[in-house]
Image (cartoon, coloured by chain):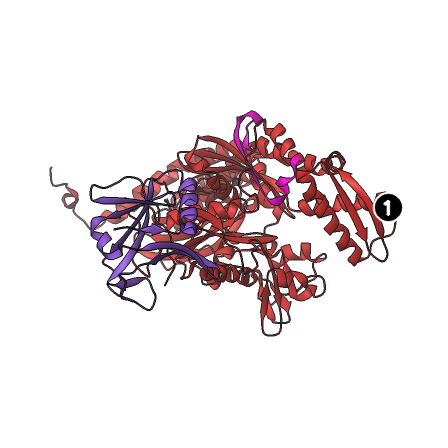
Chain colours: A red, B purple
Amino acid sequence: MALLQISEPGQSTAPHQHRLAVGIDLGTTNSLVATVRSGNVQTLPDENGNHLLPSVVRYLDNSVEVGADALLHAVADPANTIVSVKRFMGRGIGDLRVLGSKLPYQFVDADKAVPRIQTRGGDVSATEVSAEILRALKKRAINTLGDELQGAVITVPAYFDEAQRQATKDAASLAGLNVLRLLNEPTAAAVAYGLDSGREGVIAVYDLGGGTFDISILRLHQGVFEVMATGGDSALGGDDIDHVIAEWMLDQAGYTQDPEPRLARELMRAARAAKEDLTEQSQTGIAIDTDEFQWHGSLSREQMNALIEPLVRKTLMSCRRALRDAGIANQDIIEVVMVGGSTRVPYVRDRVGEFFECEPLVSIDPDRVVAIGAALQADVLVGNKSGEDMLLLDIIPLSLGIETMGGLSEKIIQRNTPIPVSRAQDFTTYKDGQTAMALHVVQGERELVSDCRSLAHFELRGFPPQVAGAARIRVTFQVDADGLLSVHAREENSGTEASVDVKPSYGLTDGEIEAMLRESIDHAEEDMQTRTLREEQVEAERVIEALDSALEADADLLTEEESQTISAARESLVLTSAGDDPEAIKKAIVGLEKACEDFVARRMNTSIRKAMKGHAIDEYATEDE
Amino acid sequence: MAITVTQAAADRVNDFLANRGKGIGLRLGVKTTGCSGMAYVLEFVDELNPEDEVFEDHGVKVIVDKKSLVYIDGTELDFTREGLNEGFKFNNPNEKAQCGCGESFTV
């Protein structure tokens, strides 16, 4: 008979309707799956008792290996064995070329938007590779839980943009997983410690993984985790700690050559073992015995601390920068959550505790804490908890907006708005007879579109021609619970519609994502000035355009002298608007409008006379007269 | 009338209760749903109802409502592992037949 789990009071399910849900930590180096069973949250091991699934996929002629099996071949078969695929998620071919010189993969340029990697089993995209990892975890979960999954919460780094989130979601649907929602990794870690129902305040999440370091500053306010700042180093992690220890061993042995790959691996293994020993002990013995290299020695915790001090200092510098970005002081942090296997090193814990002036949270296995938080969230979302458990909200990390005249960004949804959210704004046409409008969706805090990130272009076409400013175009931005955006435009007078789901428009480098917020602060004043200038320039252009079309129609209403005055004022506006003084442009606009006053009045009269021609004056009498 | 709990099941229940941080025991019961007539209920208990009977075995309080008791009297609750899956199992002497999936039964 089927095996049963204990439910919360009153939450028993009917047979075959178990609300099974998992949390998945889709990591750069390792991935995990966790679930809540009998009220107990746990990560799920494979047949051999391993909880961590190496995020490695190897393509063979007709099959695919995932995890430890694939990892074994990473050295021997690098071209077909894909490691750290997370770094490529949602990235364009241009970004990959930058990384390219160091990568063993052959990228195919066939489809510009989505670069594909050439393997023995065919060309694959980063999304497809991630899907293989998710598929393996899904299979493990189904084998363990004994039934189909209703859904999964998948974690992503807080700095992932729309394109990277969409790519992650696409990978899940390829793997046949229903994504309940994407959750930021630091948020998941905070949830695992139950901080979402705890004291409101600012939390730091220090995540030192195998190959990456991330620091996130979150603010918990009314059940919402707001990402205040993120930072880190995409090439710093536990592997670097092993590396400095290995270097030290070579030094001690007086070995000066470059070690062979096999010796290098052996050194790294010994270094890792020594590091792990020193978590519990204050001294450890090391013995390396290969054909070309023999060395016996011992390493004390103090010695190791001295070796890794520069690395730890580097992470703390990132922390300091993140705090500065968030605009808060060390003492404002109420909790520090430790994530990633490397935070087991006592020296790391001590230094982080000293830096933030509070005892870091370490009671949950730092390798599993993100998956555990995701599983807890999945359990709530799938409905296994009673109503008192609040649904956790996320926020939009960067403002979303559209491009308006003059290359300015009009923000429709401000950053830090809780999601899901829907906001609309009305726009109008700029030229007489305009029947189409190009919409450019952008992300970022800067005033100029050229400084923001372009997400999508689309067009609203085929609305009836009207005079400039008469069309009413309502643009609606909707962000779902996963942070994915759809934009909808509708011309209200005619009902013409167009919409776009923000599909990955790849192409943002690591530094850019993190730098975007900082830049918007650094350039705030300059941006404001540029914005004012552009606004005046657009206005000048509009006035000139209107004047020109009026002159074309009614030039005969002007005397030669009037015509010269207007023409001079027009020239002066054209000249000043090419400059960079918004005040001068404003004055020139006023000047031109003044010069045109009589002309405008005369046109008005003429057109009224024209309209009334052939009608008796009493036809215009109003009813109440 | 009695319900028993194996040592393995008792250990798990106590772990889960400690982990959950609240709850006085474990509810065993039946619901009249499922493809074959009845389905088992297994829930944490935070408060007792007037019609509940309480048994204790291996340090675990087992709570059963009187209506369910007639269907599961004499049941031994066990905890087992099948491959990667693990969970609780009702060894119910009243059970006459199970549906193919084993999630519901008839008496």
Which residues fall within the magenta stretch? A326-346
Residue at the disc numbered 1:
A253
Vertical comparison of A430 with A104: above or below: above
* Residue A433 occupies quadrant: bottom left
Q: Residue at 44% of width from left, 42% of height from top?
A: A394
Residue toward you, A88 or A187: A187
Quadrant location of the C terminus of chain A in the rendered image = top left
Which residue extends farthest front?
B1
Q: Secondary structure at mark 1?
A: loop
Instruction: Give the percent coordinates (x, y) of residue A490.
Output: 35, 53
Residue toward you, A547 or B62: B62
* Residue A241 occupies quadrant: top right
- Kind of residue at disc 1: Ala
Instruction: Give the percent coordinates (x, y) of residue A114.
Output: 56, 62
Quadrant location of the N terminus of chain A in the rendered image = bottom left
Instruction: Give the percent coordinates (x, y) of residue A202.
Output: 50, 31
Instruction: Give the percent coordinates (x, y) of residue A390.
Output: 36, 40
Residue toward you, A255 or A357: A255
